[in-house]
Amino acid sequence: MQKSKRKIIGKIIAVPALIGLIFWGYWTYHHNYLLQKTNVPPLPQISAVKPQSRTLTITYSYIGQVEAINDTQIVPYISGYVNKIDVKGGEHVKKGDILAIIQQDEYIAALTSANGDLSAAEAELVNAKSQYERMKKAGTGVISQSELDSAKAAYLSAQGKFEKAKAQKQTAETNFAYTYLTAPFDGVLGNIALSLGDYISPNSHNLMQLVQYDPIRVAFSVSYKEYLKHFQNYKNTDLVFRLRLSNGEILSQIGKIEYTANIIDKKTDSLAIYTQFDNPESKLLPNAYVEVLLEKTYTNVWLIPKYEVLLQPEGDFIYVVDNNILQTRKVEILGEYENQYVVEYDFSSDEFWVDENVDLNLLNKKVSIKNTVSDAAPEQ
C-alpha cells in the first residue's frame, strides 16, 4: 500500500514537471528565434521613382547658311550695243520682265531678209512642184525620162531651199528675240554694271546678277549619328524647321527638307541637309548665317535628371530597382529638356529608377525602396 501510494505521488509530480519542461523548451526556442530575427541587419534603403512616360517636343539647334535656289549672271546670247536699260540695281523683277535691250537695227534687217528669202524659196518650191506634177502626169510618151528626172530634181532642190529658208528665218527671229535681255526667274537684281551704248557679247561678264529670294534654301550639316537618328527615314510631317536670325528673331515660316547630300564629308564626318523656306519679306539673304531650329516630337519618353544618368563610352545607363534588386539599364538619350535628359527606354511595371547616389557595392543585391514617388507631369 505504501509502495502504491508512492507511485501515485510520483506520477502527480512528473506531470507538472513534464509540462514545465515543454513550456521551458518552447519559451527557449521562441526567445532564441526572436533574438536571432532582431539581429538580422535590415535591407539597404533606396529612394526611387515610379516613372511616367510623356510626349515631348525637343528642339535641336544647328548653324545654317542661306543659299539662293537660283542665282545667275545675265549674259547676252548675241553681240551688240546697249540701246535701253529698263531696270535698276536692287529691283525685284518677275520672270520674263525685260531688263535691257540691245540695238535691234541689224537684227531687224536680218529678219526682214530672212522673210524675203523664205517667200522666194516658197514661190520656187510651188513652181517646181507644179512643173514636176504636170510632167509626171503627161508621162514618158510626151516627154523624155531625162526631162522628168530633171523636173523631179528641181522640185527636190526647191524643197531643200525652202527648208533652209525656214531655218534661217527662225534663226533671225531667235536672234531678234535675244536683243531683249529678260529675267529667267523671279528675283532681285544686284549691281548693274551696264551703261547705254556699251558693246556687249556672250563673252561679257558681271553685267548684272539676278538672285531668287523666295523661296530660298538653308543648308546645315549634321553628324552621321544625328543623320541616322533624325533624317535617315524622315518625313517632313515629323520634323518642324524654324530659323532664328542674328538679331534673335524667330521667323514664322516653317521650312521643309528639300534633299540631303548623298555622301559623307570625309573631313568632318558630317552630312549636309538642304531645307527650303518661304521668304516673302526677303529677310533671308544668300550667304547669311542663321540658327536652324529642328523641333521633333517624341511619344512615350522619360525625363530623368542629368546627374542620374551615367555617361559611359559603351553607352548611357541609369540605376533601377527591379523586383527589389538594384541594377543598371542602358538607355538612349534623345535630347535635353531644361536640366534633364529625355531618354528612350521601355520600363517594365516592376521597375523604378533610382533618384539618389548609389553605393556600387549594392549592385545586383536586394534592397528596399523608400520614398517612392511618381514623376507624373502634364504632357509638354
Image (tube, grey):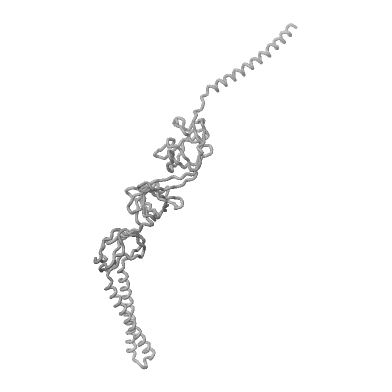
Q: Is residue 154 above or below residue 238?
A: below
Residue 226 at x, y percent in the picture: 40, 47
Q: Is residue 87 above or below residue 261?
A: below
Q: Residue furthest bottom?
A: 142
Q: Quadrant of the N terminus?
A: top right
Q: Residue furthest right?
A: 1
- Which residue is nearer to you in this view: 248 or 316? 248
Residue 114 at x, y percent in the picture: 30, 77
Residue at left offset 32%, top offset 87%: 150
Whether residue 25 sits left or right of residue 155 in the image: it is right
Residue 262 at x, y percent in the picture: 37, 54
The quarter of the picture where residue 113 lies is bottom left
- Which residue is nearer to you in this view: 37 or 188? 188
Whether residue 195 sits left or right of residue 1 in the image: it is left
The quarter of the picture where residue 32 lies is top right
Q: How many marks?
A: 0
- Residue 223: tell me if it is visible: no
- Which residue is nearer to you in this view: 255 or 139? 255
- Residue 82: tell me if it is visible: yes
